[in-house]
Image (cartoon, rainbow, N blue to C red):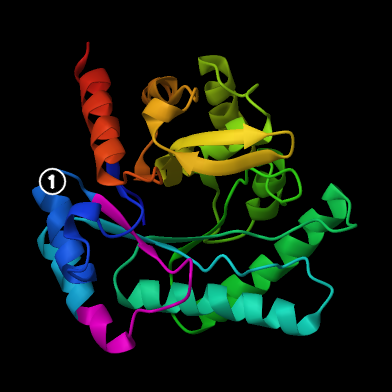
Amino acid sequence: MGLENLFVGPAGIPLSAKGMGVIDGVKKVRELGLSAMEIEFVRGIWLKPTETSSLRNTARDVSVILTVHAPYYINLLSKEESTLNASIKRITDSARLGYLAGAWSVVFHSGYYGKLSSEKAVDVVKNVLRRVIGELMNEGVRIWVRPETMGGLAEFGSLEEVVSVVEGVEMANVALDFAHLYARSRGAFNRLRDFTGALELIESRLGSEALKEMHIHLSGIEYGDRGERRHVDFEDSTFNWVDVLQALKDYDVKGVIICESPSLESDALLIQRELSSRFSRT
C-alpha cells in the first residue's frame, strides 16, 4: 500500500472540468500536470458501483492516485445509536466504493466531543474504528481508513487524539490537515518547527513507515475564537503552507497531498511547483 513519492491534486473534480463528470475530472487532473484527486462524498455518496471500474481503469491509465473523503454527516461520538450506525455506514460505504474505484485512502471527520473528555472520546472513536476496519477487512476491502485532524475546538481531532486513535490499528493512519491544526491553535501552529514537530510525533508514536503512507490536506484557512471558520485560497490566508512543504522534504514524507482551497487546482499547482522546486534543490 506504500507510495514512492508525494502526489498532489485537488479535493474533487477540477473547477476547469466542472460539469464533465468524475472520469473526465481525473483526465483533467493529469492534463494539468497533477497526480492525485480526492473523490468528494462530503454532501453524500454519489458514485455508483457500476461506475467504479471505469474510474479505476482511467485513474490507473493516466497515473492519478485517488483518495476519498467520506460525508460530513458523521458523528461517532453521538449518544444516539441511530446516528452512530448511520455514521459508521457512511464510512464503510465510502471505503467500499473507494476500494472498488482503486482509491488508496479514505478520510473522515470523527465528530463532536459533546460532554465527553478527550480521553473518553479517544476510546470511543478507536473502538468504532476497529469495528469499521474489521468489517471492511472481513469483506476483503483493504484501504487506508483515516480520522482527520480538525480545525474547530468543538470537534474531536487534535493531532494527539488522532494519533492515539490509529495507534496499533491495522490499516489505520492519520489524515493530517495542517491548515486545520493552524486554525485549531488559532494561529500558533504556523512555524517550520511546529510542522516538523507534528511529523516527529507521528514518527515516534506510529513508526517511520507512517510517514511513507501520509494522506495530507493543505489549504488557506480563516479562524476565530473557536477555531476554523472557512477554507480560503493561500493568497487570502496567513497560514505558512510553504514551510509545511519544507517539513515534508526534511522528513522524506511520501503519500498524497490534497488541496482543499476553494480554487482547487490553482492552489494545487502552487503546491506542485513549490514542492518540485524544493525537492530539486541540492
Q: Nearer the viewer, residue 179 or 43?
A: 43
Residue plotted at (60% across, 42% down): 229
Q: Residues within 10 Å of mark 1 (few under 14, many from 20)?
A: some
Residue plotted at (46% across, 38% down): 211
Report the number of discs: 1
- Name the outermost residue toward the top: 282
Q: Nearer the viewer, residue 123 or 109?
A: 109
| Magenta stretch holds residue 85 | no
Which region shows up in magenta?
A: 36-53
Q: Assign the N terminus to one quadrant of the image.
A: bottom left
The answer to whether 62 appears left or right of 251 in the picture is: left
Residue 10 at x, y percent in the picture: 31, 49
Q: Nearer the viewer, residue 226 or 270?
A: 226
Residue plotted at (9% across, 50% down): 31
- Name the outermost residue toward the bottom: 50
Instruction: Tell me if residue 262 comes above or below residue 138 in the rendering.
Output: above
Instruction: Tell me if residue 251 comes above or below residue 49 in the rendering.
Output: above
The answer to whether 5 appears left or right of 176 in the picture is: left
Q: Which residue matches tag 1?
A: 32
Residue 69 at x, y percent in the picture: 45, 62
In the rendered structure, which amino acid carries the disc numbered 1? Leu
Q: Assign the C terminus to one quadrant of the image.
A: top left
The answer to whether 220 appears left or right of 135 in the picture is: left
From where the camera sits, is residue 178 visible?
no
Residue 267 at x, y percent in the picture: 30, 37
Residue 242 at x, y percent in the picture: 39, 22
From where the camera sits, is residue 201 visible?
yes
The answer to whether 20 appears left or right of 105 in the picture is: left
Label 1 element class: loop
